[in-house]
Amino acid sequence: MYAGYPIYTPSQKYAFEHDEYELWKESFNINMKCKEFITDNIYFLRQNGNYKGFINELTETFGLERAMFVLARSLQNEDFDDRLGEVVKKRTEYFEYEDGKPENLNEHGHDRSRFYVISAFSPSMETVFLSLMETELNQIIIPAFIYEREREQETGVAI
């Protein structure tokens, strides 16, 4: 549904200044829908344990990159929390939110990316993020592995 729509990462301020506000707004609205989807489902995951089904639906609907982008904002908000593992903390550091930079805060001094933050922490958030990281890693490694295997079959030389 939204998986093919790119994330607009520049700030709202930049979007206004460069006649790209509609791109920013559409991306922001999809990010909010992604947050709502995660929020509506995250608390039930511990009870039903259907992480794989949830991850599949989340990434098919919103795309892997957007799902990680939105969830990372919530986890960055919890970075003081000792419940988060170091691997997750380190990976979330790669996500930058231009609207959160001091020069891009709105007229009231608010960071628009804070709207993506899920208000109550759930341990399932870390589990979901780890699953998204695994999916991300598989998308990088598997194609390389397939390429190497096919190349070896073609040439008879192992790479």
Image (cartoon, rainbow, N blue to C red):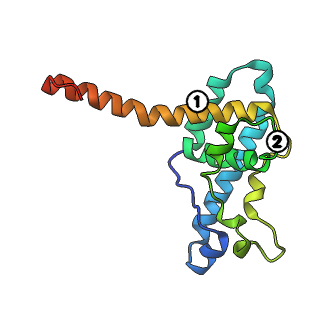
Query: Up-down: is 60 above or below 72?
Result: above
Q: Mark 2 points at which residue?
A: 81
Indicate the position of residue 20 as horizontal and vertical percent values. 56, 72
Kindly identify the residue that appears in the image at 81 percent across and 68 percent down: 110
Tell me which corner region of the image, top left, top right, bottom left or bottom right, holds residue 57.
top right
> Disc 1 marks which amino acid?
Asn
Marker disc for residue 64? none
Q: Nearer the viewer, mark 2 or mark 1?
A: 2
In which quadrant of the rendered image does the C terminus lie?
A: top left
Q: In the figure, is residue 155 to the left or right of 74?
A: left
Q: In which quarter of the image is residue 56?
A: top right
Q: Measured from the top left, where is residue 58 in percent x and y?
A: 62, 36
Q: What residue type is labelled 2?
A: Asp
Quarter of the picture containing the N terminus is top right
Q: In this view, does 85 lie above or below 36?
A: above
Question: Tag on residue 56?
Answer: 1
Residue at image location 55% in from the left, 78% down from the top: 18
